[in-house]
Amino acid sequence: YLGGFAVALIAPSAKTVSWMAASVSGGIAGGLFWTAQGGYFAAAASLLSTSTGRPREETTASLAGTFSVVFLLFEVLSKLAFSGLQTMLAPGTIALVFYLLALLALLAMCWVQELAAPQQASSVYDRLVGTLSLCADPVVWLLSPTNLTFGFCTALMNGHVNATYASVELGSGSVAVLGAVTSGIAAVVAFTLSRLPGSFGKAPLITFGAFCFFSIPFCMLVLHCCNSWGRSLVVLYIFQGMGRAVFESTNRAVFADFFRSAQVESSFANASVQVNFAFALSFFLQTVLTEYWSSIIVASLAISTPLCYVGASALRGGWQRHKQNDDFQA
């Protein structure tokens, strides 16, 4: 992914092919990472819960928060470094630097501890069938609004706010800094959420994230953002950061709680499809959708998020009680 961008910037004659190769590689990598991380995360949560005696729901919440903080802090450093390097190096050289850093990260993966799976490893075909079969589970779709809201809201921020307002009113160099603000706020909020007691529950956090995402189109539709807002535009990036904290931490923990064993990786694969579908659809529709309608979509999805979560909890709880009754009768 990064190598393709580096080639495109260093060798303009191969720009088109390199852009296409980088985009395809990035899409494949994103889908694989989300799925693999989900399975590894759920396995680690189960082992930690067993060894410490803590409820698994508390363990998933704590681990999700820790993961999000580390991930987002590295993202902050990357964006600040990119912003600083822009004043010293050519874009192609910057891309090459990040490509070399990515290679170092790839080598570091060799030292990641492999967690033993409780069941025999399944084939790629079996995993594909498992992912597709899980689409029939209504819980997957009831949990989708958080993923869809994040996808559409991120596209709204990148496609409209960054391009139309931030780069015009604050300069093109401000976009990377504002992105770092979003990631920094997300890291701080994710750390705070991970320290909440397990009894607090995840429903209030999902609602909080939805409220933060909803606040962005609210500013644009009701408060008539964003012409002449100047530095006040940072408010939108703060809301995006707080919403993203819930997406990266609590949302991940929710999928690990609702789906167990063989279904975990399939559920995270479906979550990845939902997010990337929202990204792609939003960017494609930007040629025909106005800022108004993009904001309406984000607001509608945000409003539906806590309602759908309650429905998913009720549905999953009903199934679990039914299974317990069957086990008791057996």
Image (cartoon, rainbow, N blue to C red):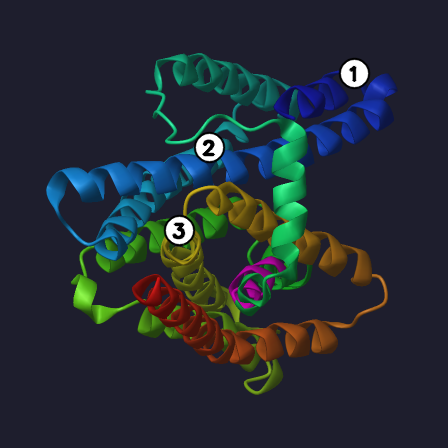
Amino acid of disc 2 = Gly
Please provide percent x and percent y for residue 10.
73, 17
Q: Tag on residue 256?
A: 3
Image-based side of 244 in relation to 174, left or right = left
Q: Tag on residue 96?
A: none
Q: Secondary structure at mark 1?
A: loop
Please provide percent x and percent y for residue 100.
52, 14
In the rendered structure, which segment of residues is drawn in magenta? 143-151
The one nearer the camera, 8 or 147, is 147
Amino acid of disc 1 = Ala
Q: Secondary structure at mark 3?
A: helix
User: Which residue is located at x 39 percent, y 60 percent?
Assistant: 246
- Check disc 1 and report the residue beneath it: 11
| Residue 330 placement: quadrant | bottom left
Image-based side of 90 in relation to 54, left or right = right
- Check disc 2 and report the residue beneath it: 84
| Separation of marks 1 and 2 at Cα, in angstroms | 23 Å
Q: Main secondary structure of the magenta part?
A: helix
